[in-house]
């Protein structure tokens, strides 16, 4: 039995010794390096490009401009292909562009013998532009006479839903209502390994692309679309990857690397972005601007919530409106007994492109909702925690959006657990005397709901192949990608749980190669343990059956009297009685001249359920009014992610999400000039990614519900931890100071403005 | 291209090289196959390229290779011997401080220097944080990294 145990991660030794090889650690003889020529303005048309000086540089092998690339528009979002043409991502990008839409847009690319030469050459290329107006605020972007950022217009998508009842009646039944404006910032994933890929050809027809990607199979399709090149002749390899957080659920450099090798006779070409390029020329999180309204009746029931947002997707759609759609949908199950209206519009802007980022629009929407909830409770004179407890969903409640019952719903228990862990009631009383003066204390709470995958919006497909090796061990091939979250280890535990084979005999092949890895769309949407876990379960069942059937053929003992324990096949009734070892069985199966064959199992499975997951953050803070600084004294996340497969890995996911959310709450933002589109802080000195000194002790706990739609009772966990810390911190600031921040980040700069406005300083 | 001959030890092995004087120690170590040295920023902000130079953690991306002449250099590869990981490496594994693994070798070298420096002394989490502030990690929120270092100093 392996599920539920803190098994050591399979790649731990490879990683602590530094032996794990990432994309940059593979070299090929004669590898060339490509560097983009990027626009230094945020909006305009290229008037002229002069490459003479760059071409003359020794070591420069080729220069391609927007005139040299295929006239093919492609979409970069790492979504499964949609058979519904109306549901595909916007095809709005060429490999290089004449129409530059953000500072850093790609107009040309240099290939040289070394990265140093390529960068030098890129600097020598002279580009002249006809400038166009820079559009970076919703008012300007949506103005009637606004310049079109793309020929399709400035609106990428818009939708609205009202669910759970009649809005007019809900408003009528409310004792109190309120409406406030909120906004979230553009933040960056900051995975430690920058975007990198290299491509080469081993003949005249097939392209290999090695990439730091979360989505090898999807990357293969998009490369094929971008180059109009046969999909079956492209192979994408994903080695170890140094983090992604959604930024690598997008193709960023892969189609260009493939294009370059194709153009250059199959020579190996690497594109390795700098940290500065990675910060402002890849993907970011969509900033949301808008309002949240809510109502409460005389019994403390949340009568309605109504969120209206504009989402800025930047220069290219990437995941575009899907972000706001997902954010709105996923927020519907935490307080499912109220009327919910959600209205969103996603627009282009002359900013770095926003794409997928951990929790995919949900942190933005929940920031709005949980801020509004707090203020509504205060307006009604109810304890904000009691208000949430009263309205939290319960098992059996109906998801108002898809009308299906929520089978496991542990939000209420999460809130109760957190209340005890942080000592909420006592501290609430104690902190009453710290509400004036320079140092103030406050408590905050915020809830969230999320989902376990993308169904029914997108297909949820996972495929697994297992093979018994001659020595009795098992190889597991999956298209699902280990990106640091620990999915390989969790899959090994699941396979062990179902087959009975010990985890140390199970090797999950960590590298995906689209030529032989079974089809799976990759790591995103916190889908892998939920969706991939189903495929693992079904394949493991099949493998076990095949092994036991062969044991029957070999030994004459009926398969239904046998089970696998560790590395042996034993009698169910007498587990200490070995019938045959897995090794002996496997050797017989492989090498007996008259029977057997390689014992394998393969399953491709589509999950057609989507379990919501839940949780909350409790935080205890101190605010230094004069320094405008928030000091987190204690912070706890409590999660209902169903059954926890591996507690040590689960805690790691929670800590990581909390750390990122604390950064987004207190420090992180991409600073972009509204007038010029200039990015001020695309470097690590000025972009305030939290260091170890900025991050407090992080605590977490779990409420382990049993989710009946998953074979191991589990639900999503990868992304959810990032959702609720920021609003909880915001609510704690409100509790401590009486000042209600409405914008992220709540940095000293912003708190200074607010405290000054409110007369605190 | 101007070159200079340098001699240094890496993980106990003597290396003599004629190096391009413009190259960083990061470039040269990676060319020597020590790919635990990762480039995350190239400007000394992220610490993914940390090696110990005469037992002091350094960002090798902004340390010229020629400066390494006569120095003793340690990287994560060398901390594991005869198939056994070091105490610090094991502590990272046990604490769950390893996720994507890209910052891990650099962090481990900073922790190794820290543990050697404060062996037998009482340290608090603030000091651990202060002396690891040159290494960035986006996966762990640093919590388990602090726990791993603490556990190395316990016995």
Image (cartoon, grey):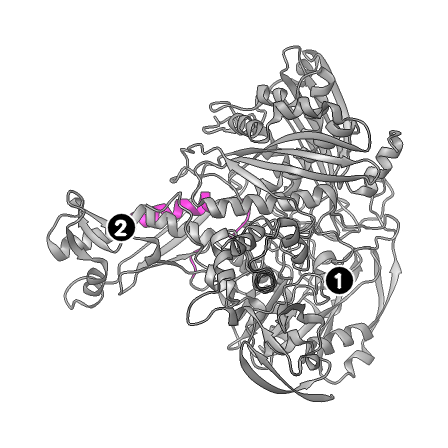
| Residue A536 located within the stretch drawn in magenta | yes
Residue A7 magenta: no
Secondary element under disc 1, as helix, strand or loop, is loop
- A430 to the left or right of A647: right
Q: Is residue B91 above or below residue A126?
A: above
Please give the residue where the numbered disc 1 appears in the rendered image.
Answer: A97
Report the chain holding disc 1: A
**Residue assigned mark 2:** A544
The magenta span reads A517-545
Residue at 71% over, 15% down: A380
x and y percentages locating residue A49 in the rendered image: 83, 71
Q: Nearer the viewer, residue A93 or A632?
A: A632
- Between the C-alphas of marks 1 and 2, the distance is 54 Å
The majority secondary structure of the magenta stretch comes to helix
Picture coordinates of residue A37, whole percent (x, y): 76, 68
Q: Position of residue A653 (x, y in %)?
A: 54, 46
Q: Quadrant of the C terminus of chain A?
A: top right
Report crowding for label 1: few under 14, some 14 to 19, many 20 or more residues within 10 A (C-alpha): some
In the displayed structure, A600 sits above or below A710; it is: below
Q: Is residue A594 left or right of residue A441?
A: left
Mark 1 or 2: in front is 2
Which quadrant of the figure has residue A47? bottom right
Q: Secondary structure at mark 2?
A: helix
Residue nearest the observer in this picture, A87 or A444: A444
Extreme residue in the left direction: A556
């Amino acid at each position: 039995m392996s599920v539920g145990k803190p098994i050591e991660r399979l790649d731990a030794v490879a990683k602590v010794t530094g032996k794990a090889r990432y994309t940059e650690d593979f070299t090929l003889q004669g590898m060339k390096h490509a560097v983009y020529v990027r626009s230094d303005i945020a909006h305009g048309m290229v008037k002229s490009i002069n490459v003479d000086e760059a071409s003359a540089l020794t070591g420069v092998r080729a220069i391609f401009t927007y005139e040299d690339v295929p006239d093919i528009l492609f979409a970069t979002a790492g979504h499964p292909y949609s058979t519904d043409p109306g549901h595909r991502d916007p095809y709005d990008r060429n490999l290089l562009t004449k129409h530059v839409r953000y500072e850093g847009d790609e107009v040309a690319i240099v290939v040289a013998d070394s990265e140093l030469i390529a960068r030098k050459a890129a600097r020598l290329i002279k580009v002249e532009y006809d400038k166009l107006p820079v559009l970076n605020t919703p008012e300007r972007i949506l103005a009637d006479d606004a310049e079109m950022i793309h020929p399709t217009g400035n609106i990428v998508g818009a939708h609205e839903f009202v669910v759970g009842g009649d809005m007019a009646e809900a408003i009528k039944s409310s004792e109190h209502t309120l409406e406030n404006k909120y906004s979230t910032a553009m933040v960056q994933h900051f995975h430690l390994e920058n975007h990198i890929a290299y491509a080469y050809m081993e003949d005249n027809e097939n392209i290999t692309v090695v990439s730091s990607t979360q989505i090898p199979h999807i990357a293969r399709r998009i490369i094929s679309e971008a180059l109009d090149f046969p999909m079956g002749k492209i192979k994408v390899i994903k080695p170890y990857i140094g983090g992604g957080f959604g930024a690598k659920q997008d193709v960023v450099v892969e189609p260009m690397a493939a294009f370059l090798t194709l153009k250059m006779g199959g020579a190996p070409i690497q594109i390795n972005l700098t940290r500065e390029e990675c910060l402002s020329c890849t993907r970011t999180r969509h900033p949301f601007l808008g309002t949240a309204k809510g109502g409460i009746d005389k019994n403390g029931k949340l009568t309605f919530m109504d969120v209206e947002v504009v989402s800025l997707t930047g220069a290219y759609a990437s995941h575009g409106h899907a972000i706001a759609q997902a954010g709105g949908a996923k927020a519907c199950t935490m307080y499912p007994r109220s009327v919910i209206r959600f209205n969103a519009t996603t627009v282009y802007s002359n900013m770095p492109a926003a794409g997928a980022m951990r929790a995919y629009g949900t942190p933005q929407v929940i920031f709005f909702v949980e801020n509004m909830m707090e203020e509504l409770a205060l307006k009604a004179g109810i304890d904000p925690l009691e208000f949430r407890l009263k309205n939290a969903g319960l098992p059996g409640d109906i998801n108002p959006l898809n009308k299906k019952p929520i089978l496991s719903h542990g939000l209420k228990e999460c809130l109760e657990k957190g209340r005890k862990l942080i000592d909420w009631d006592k501290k609430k009383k104690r902190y009453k005397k710290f509400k004036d003066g320079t140092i103030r204390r406050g408590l905050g709470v915020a809830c969230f709901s999320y989902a376990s995958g993308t169904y029914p919006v997108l297909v949820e497909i996972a495929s697994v192949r297992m093979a018994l090796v001659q020595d009795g061990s098992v190889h597991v091939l999956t298209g699902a990608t280990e990106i640091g979250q620990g999915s390989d280890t969790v899959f090994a535990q699941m396979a062990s749980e179902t087959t009975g084979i010990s985890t140390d005999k199970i090797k999950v092949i960590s590298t995906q190669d689209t030529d032989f890895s079974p089809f799976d769309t990759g790591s995103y949407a916190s889908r892998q343990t939920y969706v991939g876990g189903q495929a693992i379960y079904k394949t493991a069942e099949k493998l076990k059956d095949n092994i036991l059937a062969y044991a029957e053929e070999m030994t004459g003992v009926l398969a239904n009297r046998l089970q696998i324990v560790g590395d042996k096949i034993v009698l169910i009734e007498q587990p200490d009685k070995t019938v045959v070892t897995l090794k002996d069985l496997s050797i017989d199966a492989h090498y007996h001249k008259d029977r057997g064959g390689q014992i394998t199992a393969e399953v491709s499975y589509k999950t057609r359920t989507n379990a919501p997951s839940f949780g909350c953050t409790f935080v205890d803070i101190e605010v230094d009014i004069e320094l405008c600084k928030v000091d987190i004294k204690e912070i706890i996340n409590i999660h209902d992610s169903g059954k926890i497969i591996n507690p040590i890995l689960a805690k790691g996911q929670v800590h990581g999400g909390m750390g990122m959310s604390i950064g987004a709450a207190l420090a992180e933002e991409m600073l972009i000039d509204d007038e010029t589109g200039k990015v001020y802080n695309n470097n690590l000195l000025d972009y305030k990614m939290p260091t170890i000194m900025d991050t407090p002790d992080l605590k977490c706990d779990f409420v382990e519900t049993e989710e009946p739609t998953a074979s191991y009772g589990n639900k999503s966990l990868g992304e959810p931890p990032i959702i609720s810390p920021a609003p909880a911190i915001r609510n704690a600031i409100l509790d401590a100071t009486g000042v209600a921040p409405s914008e992220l980040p709540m940095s000293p700069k912003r708190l200074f403005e607010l405290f000054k406005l409110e007369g605190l300083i | 291209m101007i070159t200079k001959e340098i001699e240094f030890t890496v993980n106990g092995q003597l290396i003599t090289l004629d190096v391009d004087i413009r190259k960083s120690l990061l470039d040269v170590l990676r060319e020597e196959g020590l790919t635990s040295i990762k480039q995350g920023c190239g400007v000394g902000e992220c610490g993914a390229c940390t090696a110990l130079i005469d037992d002091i953690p350094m960002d090798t991306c902004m340390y010229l290779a020629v400066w390494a002449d006569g120095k003793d250099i340690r990287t994560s590869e060398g901390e594991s011997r005869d198939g056994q990981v070091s105490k610090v490496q094991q502590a990272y594994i046990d604490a769950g401080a390893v996720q994507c693994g890209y910052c891990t070798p650099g962090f481990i070298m900073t922790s190794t220097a820290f543990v050697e420096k404060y062996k037998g002394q009482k340290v608090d989490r603030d000091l651990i944080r202060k002396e690891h502030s040159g290494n960035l990690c986006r996966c762990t929120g640093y919590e388990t990294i602090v726990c791993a270092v603490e556990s190395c100093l316990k016995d």
